[in-house]
Amino acid sequence: MRWLGLALCMGAAVAAGPAWERVRLGGDSGDRVVEARVVVEALDGSLLLEHRDQRLEVVPSGEVRERAAIESSVESPTPRELGADVLRTLPEGFDQLATRHYVVCFDTSRAYAQWCAALFERLHDAFVNFWRQAGFELAGPDRPLVVVIFADRQRYEQHAARDLGAATDRVVGYYNLLTNRVTTFDLTGSDLVGGREGRSAGRAGLEILASQRAAGLVATLVHEATHQMAFNAGLHRRLAAVPLWVSEGLAIYFETPDLASDRGWRGIGGVNAPRRDRFLASRRAGWFERLVRGDEAFRDAGEALDAYAGAWAATAFLIQTRKAAFVDYLRVLSAKEPLGEDDPDHRLAEFSEAFGADPASLEEAISKFVVRMK
C-alpha cells in the first residue's frame, strides 16, 4: 500500500472528471508527452494519471509543463493492443493470451497460461454473480484485466523486487494497485510443489493440485485475482481509502480452494481452516475496533497474520449474518474517491452507521460464529 505516501505528497486532492488529456511532463530524464486520463487533480496542481495500459502515475505539480484536452474520444485498446502495450514493459520472450475478461502475458507454456486463465474466468463470473445475488449490481470490469506469468521464480523475483522489495521471496503472486496487474510465476516447476528448479515449466495445472501445498498456492492466486476484481468491478476504487480489513477480508473470503475441483477452486465462503485456527488462537478484546479504525496491524510483521485472520472472521460473519448491511457499507466505500482523506473516527462512524453497532460489541458474536463454522 505504498500509495499512502503518494497521497501525502499530493496534498489535498480533488476528484477530476474522466477527461483525457495530452500532458507534457518534465523530469530529470527530459520531457515526455503522454495521453492519459486525469483521475485526480490536487489543489497544488499535481495529477493522478491513468494511462491506456491501466497504469496509474502520480505526477508532482513541478513536472507538469503543458496540458491540453483531447477533443476526440479516446477508444479503449482492444485486448490484443492492450497485451502489446503490456509486453513492451516486460522482458523479451513473452506472449499473450486473450480470454473473455483477461489478457494473460506469459513466458511459460500456453497450457499453464490457459489453466490460470480458466481459474480467473471462473472467479470473475462467481464474483459478479455473488454480489448480484447479494443485491449489489456491479458494473463489472469495462476492460480486460491483465495477468503476468513468469516461467520461473527467479525471473519473477527479479521483476517483482521493484514492487515488493525484500518480501519478494515470500510471495508467489501479487496484485499491484498502480499497474492494475496480477503478477505470478509458473508454480508447476517450483520446489513449492515438490518440483525441481530448472525443469521445463508448463505441466498441466492439475500437477499443482497433487501437491500437499496446493491449497495455499491456489488460494494465493485467487486472493490476488479477487483484489483485482474488486478494484475493477465497482466494489472499490483504486487508491481510495478502503479499510484493509474489508479488502483483505473479502479476498480471503473468496480465496478458499477446492482441491476436488479440476480448476482448484469453485466456491465462495468456505471454511478457511488456517485463518479460523489463527483467529481462535489469537483474538483479544478490542481486536475488531482496532481493525476498523486503522490499518496499522496489517503493516506490523508481528501482528499481520492475526489481522488477516480477524479480517476473514469479521467478513464471513457480516456477510452470512448481516448481508444487507454489509452491502450498504460496501456501497459507501465504493463511492470513495482516489487519494481521498480518511481518519480513524470517520472510519468508525461509517461502520457504526452501516451496522447499527460498534465493532467492539460484535466481537463475542463473531467468535461464537467462527467456533460453529464447519
Image (cartoon, grey):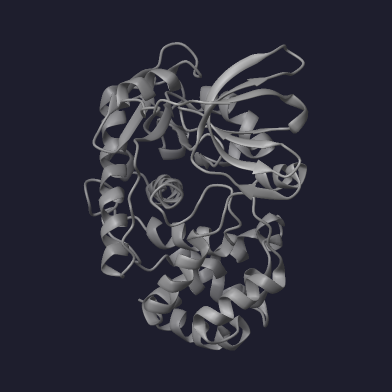
Q: Work out whether 24 lies above or below 300.
A: above
Please indicate, yes or no, whether residue 303 appears anywhere in the rendered image. no
Image-based side of 62 in relation to 181, left or right: right
- Residue drawn at x 35%, y 37% is 143
Front position in the image: 189 or 122: 122
Q: Position of residue 110 (x, y in %)?
A: 28, 23
Q: Work out whether 287 lies above or below 152.
A: below
Front position in the image: 219 or 6: 6
Q: Position of residue 253 (x, y in %)?
A: 42, 63
Q: Work out whether 234 lies above or below 359.
A: above
Front position in the image: 14 or 278: 14
Q: Work out whether 326 lies above or below 261.
A: below
- What count of labels does the image hold? 0
Query: Quadrant of residue 373 in the image?
Result: bottom left
User: Is the C terminus in the top left, top right, bottom left or bottom right quadrant?
Assistant: bottom left
Please indicate, yes or no, whether residue 31 appears anywhere in the rendered image. yes
Farthest residue to the front: give it.
71
Image-based side of 162 in relation to 264, left or right: right
- Residue drawn at x 42%, y 23% is 151
Q: Position of residue 276 (x, y in %)?
A: 48, 70
Q: Position of residue 311 (x, y in %)?
A: 54, 67
- Residue drawn at x 67%, y 83% is 285
